[in-house]
Image (tube, rainbow, N blue to C red):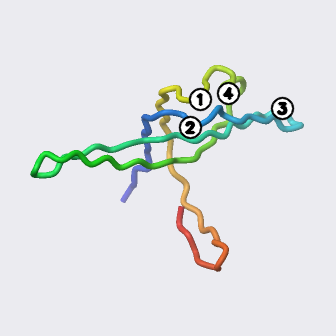
Amino acid sequence: MASVNKVMLLGNLGADPESRTFPNGDAVCNFSIATSCVRYSISINQHKNYSWSMGNFWMDGAATSISCYAIVTILGSTIISDQKEGAGYNLKM
């Protein structure tokens, strides 16, 4: 059975993207994006949930065309990795 691994994030950049170039000429841009979800309860109370996502993309000159608080759409796929937290707990990301 085939699986689909696609993600679409629409949100605001939390800071100016940080880019760096490697000696072989490849460039990577790291960014953070804030997304929100609004839902209403039965009593019409508004509940907002905010989340931050970190990401990177490999592209020449992309960091110079966007800045902090810009509204961006990110299309891609997720990669899940195991990471150790300070106390030795495993985190799935």
The mark closer to the camera, 3 or 2, is 2
Residue under circle 2? 14
On screen, 83 above or below 38?
below
Where residue 72 appears, as percent x and y from the top left, is 49, 29
| Mark with earlier residue (3, 2) | 2
Where residue 22 appears, as percent x and y from the top left, is 84, 38
Looking at the image, the residue that sits furthest to the right is 23
Choose between 3 and 42: the one closer to the eye: 42
* Circle 1: residue type: Cys
Mark 2, other Cα within 10 Å: few <14 / some 14–19 / many ≥20: some
Q: Residue at x 22, y 45 (%)?
A: 46
* Circle 2: residue type: Gly
Secondary structure state at the residue bearing disc 1: loop
Where residue 77 appears, as percent x and y from the top left, is 50, 46
Q: Quadrant of the N terminus?
A: bottom left
Q: Which mark is residue 68?
A: 1
The mark closer to the camera, 4 or 3, is 4
Secondary structure state at the residue bearing disc 4: helix
- Count of numbered badges drawn on the protein: 4
Where residue 75 appears, as percent x and y from the top left, is 48, 36
